[in-house]
Image: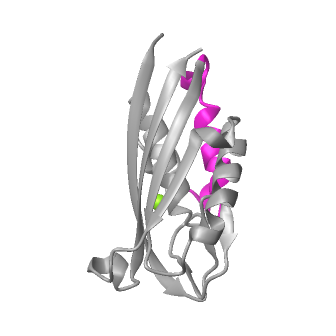
Amino acid sequence: MEYRIGQGYDVHALAAGLPMWLGGIRIPSENGFVAHSDGDVAIHALCDALLGALALGDIGHLFPDTDDRWKGVDSKELLAAVLALPAFAGWEVVNADITIALQAPKLAPHIEAMRRTLASVMGIAPDRVSVKATTTERLGFVGRGEGCEVWAIVLIARK
Ligand code: MG
């Protein structure tokens, strides 16, 4: 069996009055992410992990923020587009592990919905998708509520 591993990292700034999309779902919050797309920083990190597994570059390269086609786009569409790349034919996602650092709101009530949603877009069972959330104990830009940081790791296997 041939396996590949990939990791992805992304950061988005928070701003008042924007919708918060994270892990493919809408999170009730007074702040949302500043972005060209819907700002789903968790999906962006996941996309970069998938692209990294096959050394295909990053989503900024694939979906440039200078292209109006991607303005306000639902990041679930970006995730689906990554997996629809010809290079992914013959590969399947074994599992994904995502860590979200966000000071507020608390994400615990939304973790299961994120896992189900991301698994469904990737066409795998939810027990193959881990979503973990942490604060940074009020330290750094995350702790000051200025932004959100996400790390993702994926394993893919040749079918
Ligand atoms: Mg991003």
Q: Nearer the viewer, residue 33 or 139?
A: 139
What quarter of the picture does the C terminus occupy? top right
Which residue is painted at 56% across and 71% down in the image?
107
116 vs 39: above or below: above
Residue 146 picture location, percent across and down: 39, 82
39 vs 76: above or below: below
Per the picture, the main secondary structure of the magenta-coloured stretch is helix
Residue 132 picture location, percent across and down: 49, 58
Which residue is painted at 49% across and 81% down in the image?
104
Extreme left residue here? 140
Which residue is painted at 61% across and 48% down in the image?
78
Which residue is painted at 44% across and 73% down in the image?
102
Residue 36 picture location, percent across and down: 54, 66
Occupied quadrant, residue 52: top left
Q: Is residue 67 left or right of residue 60?
A: right
Q: Is residue 134 left or right of residue 24?
A: left
Q: Can residue 74 be seen from the camera position used here?
A: no
Q: How many marks?
A: 0
Q: Can residue 146 be seen from the camera position used here?
A: yes
Magenta part of the protein: which range? 66-90
